[in-house]
Image: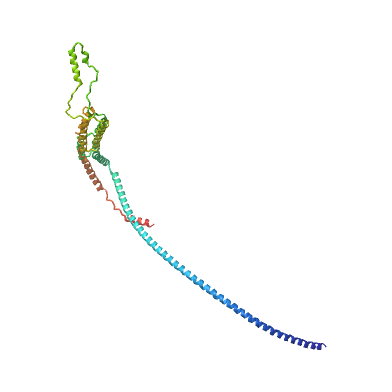
């Protein structure tokens, strides 16, 4: 039973399976048709999408190419500008290098010149130091006689300068006597020619008479101060006796003696009129301003005499004296005592000689120097010769210092 039931059931299942398969097929065909239509639609959509994407890509590529071209052009321009800048920098550097080379050349030249100057200065300084050392040694080796001779030479030089420049005879004589006493203290017979020359020069100076210029200047100053009070040549009116002034003789007249009275009256009448004769022309009456001008001109002329006297200008001094004397005699009163004093002093000054020839006193100085030279030659013959200065080592040391 069970087997039959099972057999019955199986065909039913088969039939149902067949039905399901048939339906499945029909459904499959239907689905496949639908799938084909969907695929066609999808393919069209894909083709359209592909065309859009290709056009977008091509546009993008064109834009990218254009951008790249612009970028390349910009880069090319930047490269050109960089090249120009580099060229300018190279030119500037080359110019700087040339300037530096010229500066280095100048520096080397200046260093060479400076080195040469230093070498010359060092050699001169070394020579001066050696001379000073030699002088110090010579001074140390000097004895009492050498010191006295050096001092005497100095005094003789001062005496010569004093006499030639200032004409001071008294100071010169004192200096020569001091030198003579110093040489006498040495008691050296070899110095007798110097003492003989000193004695001759002292005698010549003592016999020379110089004008007292300072005293003459003081005299002129005092006379110049007196000039405003000196009287001038001006016409003077005759003095008339005052009326009503009785004389001594009038008191002696008596009324009784008529003859005497008439004689006295006649004599009084004669005294009222006075007649004088003048062979020379009378000076005109001067105003106060003219009188001051004449006195001021006299002061200026005296000042000119003073200036010529101080400058020891003999010709100008004599001409100024003559001019002042003529001016004084022409415009001033010769009876005035101040005028007489000034005229007498100016006439005395005309006898003064300003250009006095001074004696020569350089003989003693030359004699003393010759003796000093002989003594120096003797001392130098005993001193060993000096070694020459080696400047090569000094220049090498300087080069090393400059390099450092």
State the residue at coordinates (63%, 80%).
42
Q: Position of residue 190 (x, y in %)?
A: 21, 41
Q: Residue furthest top?
A: 256
Q: Is residue 57 visible?
A: yes
Residue 30 lies in quadrant? bottom right
Q: Quadrant of the C terminus?
A: bottom left
Residue 287 lies in quadrant? top left
Residue 361 lies in quadrant? top left
Q: Position of residue 26 (x, y in %)?
A: 71, 85
Picture layout, residue 132 above or below residue 289: below
**In the rendered view, how is the structure colored?**
rainbow
Front residue of 402/144: it is 402
Q: Position of residue 275 (x, y in %)?
A: 18, 24
Picture layout, residue 155 above or below residue 388: above
Front residue of 298/183: it is 298
Judged left or right of residue 210, residue 46 is right
Picture layout, residue 96 above or below residue 372: below
Count of numbered circles in the view = 0
Front residue of 294/353: it is 294
State the residue at coordinates (66%, 82%).
35
């Amino acid at each position: 039973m069970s087997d039959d039931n099972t057999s019955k059931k199986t065909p039913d299942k088969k039939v149902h399976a067949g039905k399901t398969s048939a339906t499945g097929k029909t459904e499959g065909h239907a689905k496949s048709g639908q799938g084909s239509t969907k695929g066609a639609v999808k393919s069209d959509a894909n083709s359209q999408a592909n065309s859009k994407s290709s056009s977008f890509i091509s546009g993008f590529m064109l834009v990218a190419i254009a951008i790249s071209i612009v970028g390349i052009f910009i880069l090319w321009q930047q490269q050109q500008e960089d090249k120009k800048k580099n060229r300018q920098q190279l030119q500037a550097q080359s110019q700087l290098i040339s300037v530096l080379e010229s500066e280095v050349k100048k520096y080397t030249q200046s260093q060479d010149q400076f080195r040469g100057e230093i070498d010359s200065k060092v050699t001169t300084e070394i020579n001066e130091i050696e001379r000073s050392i030699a002088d110090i040694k010579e001074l140390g080796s000097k004895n009492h006689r050498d010191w006295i001779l050096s001092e005497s030479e100095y005094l003789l030089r001062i005496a010569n300068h004093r006499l030639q420049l200032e004409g001071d005879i008294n100071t010169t004589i004192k200096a020569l006597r001091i030198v003579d006493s110093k040489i006498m203290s040495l008691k050296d017979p070899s110095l007798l020619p110097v003492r003989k020359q000193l004695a001759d020069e002292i005698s010549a100076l003592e016999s020379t008479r110089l004008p007292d210029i300072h005293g003459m200047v003081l005299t002129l100053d005092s006379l110049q101060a007196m000039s405003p009070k000196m009287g001038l040549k001006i016409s003077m009116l005759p003095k008339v006796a005052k009326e009503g002034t009785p004389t001594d003789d009038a008191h002696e007249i008596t009324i009784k003696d008529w003859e005497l009275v008439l004689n006295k009256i006649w004599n009084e009448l004669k005294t009222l009129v006075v007649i004088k004769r003048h062979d020379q022309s009378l000076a005109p009456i001067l105003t106060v301003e003219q009188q001051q001008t004449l006195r001021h001109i006299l002061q200026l002329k005296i000042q000119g005499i003073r200036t010529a006297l101080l400058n020891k200008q003999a010709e100008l001094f004599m001409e100024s004296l003559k001019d002042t004397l003529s001016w004084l005699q022409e415009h001033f009163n010769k009876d005035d005592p101040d005028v007489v004093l000034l005229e007498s002093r100016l006439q005395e000054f005309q006898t003064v000689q300003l250009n006095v020839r001074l004696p020569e006193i350089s003989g003693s100085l030359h004699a003393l120097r010759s003796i000093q030279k002989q003594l120096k030659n003797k001392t130098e013959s005993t001193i060993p010769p000096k070694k020459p200065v080696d400047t090569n080592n000094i220049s090498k040391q300087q080069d090393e210092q400059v390099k450092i």
